[in-house]
Amino acid sequence: MDFWQWYVRRGRIDRRTWWLQYALPIGALSVLALMADVALGNSSLESIAMGETGYGPIVTTIGLLAMPASISSGATRLHDRGMSAWWLLIGLVPLFGQLALLVITGFLPGDGGPNRYGPPPSAAPLAAPQPEPAPEPERPPYWG
């Protein structure tokens, strides 16, 4: 996947692509950033769990860098289901909205056929079309 595709997507992506190229890497980066912040003394797990302090600078930076990719991938995943990207706003509803968005983007299958956002991701060409093979030259009849 091209670097800019991580930030700017068009069309549709399937569940597998969303999980492997967006959700799991962003989740892993977030956990690593939190561990780095705790190791450097920028924050502690107890204070974050109790709501006493915010996240450290590493988690904040990773979160800000991952936000456009998260929005882009969520929008294209919703497009695969035939839904507008405006449905991402349901994630602003505490707990319920985030769980609903996770179920919609991560677990429900996309539309089987083409929709207003394009063809299904599985129908997208994986490689450039190959040219037709040249026809065989005609052979003279056998005179034997």
Image (spheres, rainbow, N blue to C red):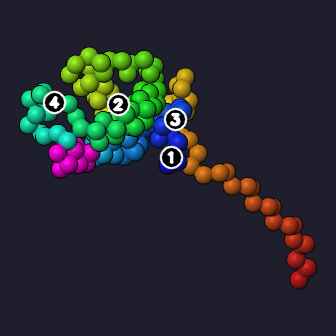
| Secondary structure under the numbered disc 3 in the rendered image | loop
**Residue 2 rendering spot, x and y as whole percentages:** 52, 48
Please name the residue that numbered disc 2 is placed on.
Answer: 105
**x then y, percent, for residue 44:** 13, 40
Q: Which mark is residue 3?
A: 1
**Along the polypeptide, which appears first: circle 2 or circle 4?**
4
Q: Determine whether, in the image, residue 25 is placed left or right of residue 42.
A: right
Q: Is the magenta stretch mostly helix, strand or loop?
A: helix
What is the distance, in whole Å, between disc 3 and disc 2 at their CAs? 17 Å
In the rendered image, the vertical position of residue 135 relative to residue 129, given as above or below: below
**Mark 2 Cα shell of 10 Å, populated few (<14), some (14-19), many (≥20):** many
Is there CB contact under 8 Å for labels 4 and 3?
no
Amino acid type for the residue under numbered disc 4: Thr
Label 4 or label 3, whichever lies nearer to me, is: 4
Residue for badge 3: 8
Query: Marks 2 and 1, how far apart in space?
Result: 22 Å
Amino acid type for the residue under numbered disc 1: Phe
Residue 15 appears in the rendering: no
Q: Residue at the spot x=37%, y=34% of the render?
A: 64
For the C terminus, the quadrant is bottom right
Q: For residue 98: magenta? A: no
Circle number at residue 53: 4
Q: Give the residue type that dot 3 points to.
A: Val
Boundaries of the magenta span: 32-41
The label on residue 11 is none
The one nearer the camera, 94 or 112, is 94
Pick whichever of labels 3 and 2 is earlier in the sequence: 3
Q: Viewer-nearest of labels 2 and 1?
A: 1
Within 10 Å of the Cα at label 3, are there few (<14), some (14-19), or many (20+) other Cα atoms? few
Q: Do the residues labelled 4 and 1 touch (CB within 8 Å)?
A: no
